[in-house]
Image (cartoon, rainbow, N blue to C red):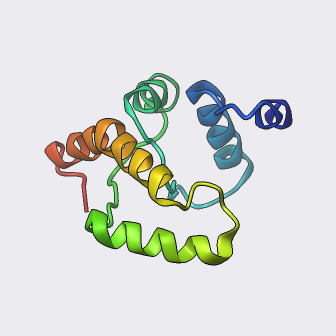
């Protein structure tokens, strides 16, 4: 299923992402402690997570590493010299930062208001 989505150059749905996370959690014994890197990225991710997972996962905290946009740009451009990634360039970085500020920052603010942000 993922292969077909990736071949089309599309992003996977929040429903599929949460399904994959749940399957991984259920298949491993992590002692009830999990770290999800880069999730949720937006309100839709949060909504699906709440609908599908909140009944059996107690989200205790979120970790956010703060960095200035200038420093992020500098690091990504440096990484782009060797990464081979098509999105490590000025134009793509600016778009990614806009998406972060528009979609992900409200998620961070939500967890901060709940006193779950570290």
Foreground: 66 or 115? Answer: 66
Foreground: 20 or 25? Answer: 20
Q: Where is residue 26? Give x, y as percent.
A: 68, 44
Q: Does residue 52 appear left or right of residue 24 in this picture?
A: left
Q: Does residue 116 appear left or right of residue 30 in this picture?
A: left
Identify the residue at image location x=29%, y=44%. Answer: 101
Rendering quarter of residue 9: top right
Q: Residue furthest front?
A: 91
Against 50, residue 109 (above or below) is: below
Q: In the picture, which quadrant includes the C terminus?
A: bottom left
Identify the residue at image location x=53%, y=55%. Answer: 32
Against 74, residue 59 (above or below) is: above
Rendering quarter of residue 88: bottom right
Q: Does residue 89 appear left or right of residue 112 in this picture?
A: right
Identify the residue at image location x=43%, y=41%. Answer: 41
Question: Is residue 33 in view from this perspective?
Answer: no
Foreground: 94 or 67? Answer: 94
Question: Is residue 2 in view from this perspective?
Answer: yes
Q: Where is residue 66? Give x, y as percent.
A: 27, 66
Identify the residue at image location x=44%, y=48%. Answer: 96
Q: In the picture, which quadrant includes the N terminus?
A: top right
- Number of numbered tags placed on the structure image: 0
Q: Where is residue 47? Give x, y as percent.
A: 41, 25
Q: Where is residue 42? Give x, y as percent.
A: 40, 35
Against 49, residue 111 (above or below) is: below
């Amino acid at each position: 299923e993922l292969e077909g989505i990736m071949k089309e150059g599309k992003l996977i749905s929040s429903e599929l992402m949460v399904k994959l996370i749940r399957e991984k959690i259920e298949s491993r014994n992590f002692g009830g402690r999990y770290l999800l890197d880069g999730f949720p990225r937006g309100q839709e991710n949060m909504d699906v997570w709440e609908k599908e997972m909140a009944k059996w996962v107690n989200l205790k905290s979120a970790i956010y590493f703060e960095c200035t946009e200038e420093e992020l740009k500098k690091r990504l451009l440096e990484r782009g010299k060797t990464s081979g990634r098509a999105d490590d360039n000025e134009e793509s970085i600016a778009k990614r930062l806009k998406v972060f500020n528009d979609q992900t920052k409200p998620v961070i603010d939500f967890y901060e208001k709940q006193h779950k942000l570290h």
